[in-house]
Every structure is written in C-alpha cells, then in structure tokens.
Amino acid sequence: MEEDGSDWGGLAPEILINIISRLTIQELWTGPMFVRKSWLTVCRDPYLWSIFDLEPWFESYPESTHLWSPDFEGKVDSMLRSVVDWSDGGLTEIRVRHCSDHALSYAADRCPNLQVLAIRSSRNVTDASMTKIAFRCRSLRELDISYCHEISHDTLVMIGRNCPNLRILKRNLMDWSSRHIGSVPTEYLDACPQDGDTEADAIGKHMVNLERLEIQFSRLSVKGLASICEGCPKLEYLDLFGCVHLSSRDITSNVSRLKWLKEVKKPDVYVPRSGDVAQTERYGHWRLYDERFDIQAMRI
C-alpha cells in the first residue's frame, strides 16, 4: 500500500464508503483494501459489514477436496473473524462454507443481531458453537446447516426453543451419486447422519413457525414426515428430494394437512424391491465454473 498525491487520496471518507459499498465482496477484498492505508481504514468501516456473503464465490468455484482441508478452513475462519471485528457487532448475515467452531463461536459472542446463518459443508462445526448461536442470536430467521455432519438433532432442539423467528431451515444431506466422489473426503461421505426421524421430530416439536424446509436425502420415514407436517402448520415449501424411504402415498396423505403449502419437492427416486440401494430416476444438471476469485490469494 502506498500513499500518493492523486485526487482519489483526498476524497472524504463518507464518499469513499459510498463508492466502495457498491463493490462485491470479491472486488472489495482484492482491490481497494490494498490501494492505500486510508482506503484500508475505510474498508473496515462497520457500515460495509452488516452482511458477509461468500456464497457467490463458492458457487463459482469447482468442488475440490482442497476445500475440506484444515488450511482452507483456517483461511475462511480468519476472514470471518476479521469481518466480525470490523462489523462492530452489526453483522446480521453470514453465508460461508468450511468454517469451524472457533470462528462461529467468535461470531456468536459478538453478533447478537445475526438473522441469517448459512454454514453448509462445515465439517468442524458442532453442537457446541451452535448452542452459542441459539442462546445469543435469538433473532435468527434463516439457518442453513446442510452437509454439516457434526451437528445433531440437539442443535435443532436448541435453535427451535430459543429462536422463535426462524422461518427457513436447510438441513440437506449429501446424496449417494458419483458427483461427490473425488471432491469430498470419503470418510466424510461415509459419516452422513442417519437419524432422520430424530431430526424430523425435533423440527416438528420446536420449529412451529417454519415456512420453508429443505431436508434433501434425509433418512426420515413416514413417521418423521408426520411429525413435521403436524408440528409445522405454516410450511409453504417442503423439499423432500432424495428421501428414499417416503412413498408418493406417504407424502400426499401427510402434506394434505398443510393449508399454506405452495410447493413440495418429491423424492424423485425409487428403491428397487431387490435391494436397499437407491437409484435415481433423474438428477439435475451440474455445472462447472471457472475460478474468478481466489480466497487463497486474499490477505487479512
């Protein structure tokens, strides 16, 4: 970073903030932060950090086992902790992947106004940090804990009891298709949670205000589905894709009690009578993206 005599150097902080606020997080993190010291100070203004959303980068980055490494997790944690500090307690939305208990607990302690938390694919986030979120971030209205295998039904109970404003829950699990092989560690795929009915029971008993629920590839049975439909009467959207233990009849008979339901995404799979291995009737198209924004190159 160098100071120079250009006209940009004399801009008032409020004007710089207005300009910088129009940038994406990728542009902000790799550009103006390293132009000059005065710009770095402006880039750390709390006004710019009410939302921390890395999801566009993850969506554009090809799946790789590297993303599951301790080194990459450390980089995400470092970024999240920095943003928490810069937000001065004003952070209301976090959308990241591959973070850990350490960073999430740090955020829970300092961001009481958090409303949106999406931490999918975070292998080292457990009930410990999620309990802190439940007790200290009671304004939570959206939660995505998809592909987080160390989070159990206990977290669902705690969130449901302490976050009455929760409207959206995403608890999708990984499927058995080949698209994950080679990009997700095998031992992690093998450790996918199996207690679908226990989680469904926790949702049905403690998340009465849910409007949108995604539980793709859950191992729940008709018993678990009944718990959800009975306990979450406000559901408008229900995603059951990949839930192989549910029949069309099971779904139809249970969702009929949901008066506000607008859409239900059915399993779209079948289990052959000759075995227990689920086969897909069809899957969506998966795209590969070019790398545009490299977290590896970012400096804190």
Image (tube, grey):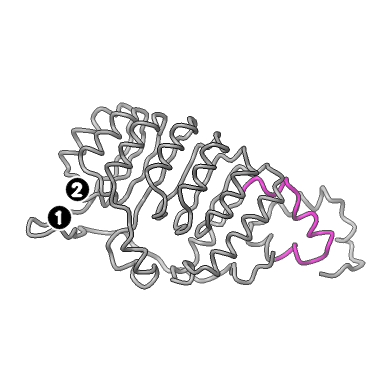
Q: Tell me residue 76's x, y (percent).
A: 58, 61
- For the point 76% across and 66% down, the residue is 34
Q: Dominant secondary structure of the magenta stretch?
A: helix
Extreme residue in the left direction: 274
- Label 1 CA crowd tier, 10 Å (few <14, some 14–19, many 20+): some
What amino acid does circle 1 point to? Answer: Val
Classify the position of the C terminus by image quarter. Answer: bottom right
Write down the residue under mark 2. Answer: 245
Is 52 in the magenta?
no
> Residue placed at 33% from the left, 42% from the top?
199
* Element type at mark 2: loop
Q: Position of residue 109 (x, y in %)?
A: 62, 44
Q: Choose top left, top right, bottom left or bottom right for residue 272.
A: bottom left
Residue 271's mark?
Answer: 1
Q: Which residues are magenta?
A: 31-51
Which label belongs to residue 179?
A: none
Seen as rendered, the residue at the extreme right is 5
State the image coordinates of residue 45 (x, y, percent, origin top left).
76, 50
Q: Is residue 77 above or below residue 267?
A: below
Q: Earlier in the sequence, mark 2 or mark 1?
A: 2
Q: Is residue 298 above or below residue 112?
A: below
Is 214 on the left or on the right of 8, as rendered?
left
CA gap between label 2 and label 1 equals: 8 Å
Residue shown at the point (47%, 35%) measured from the top left: 166
Where 24 sits versus 161, above or below?
below
Q: Amino acid at mark 2?
A: His
Q: Is 99 situated left or right of 23 in this image? A: left
Q: Is residue 152 or residue 99 the one in the foreground?
A: 152
205 displayed left or right of 282: right
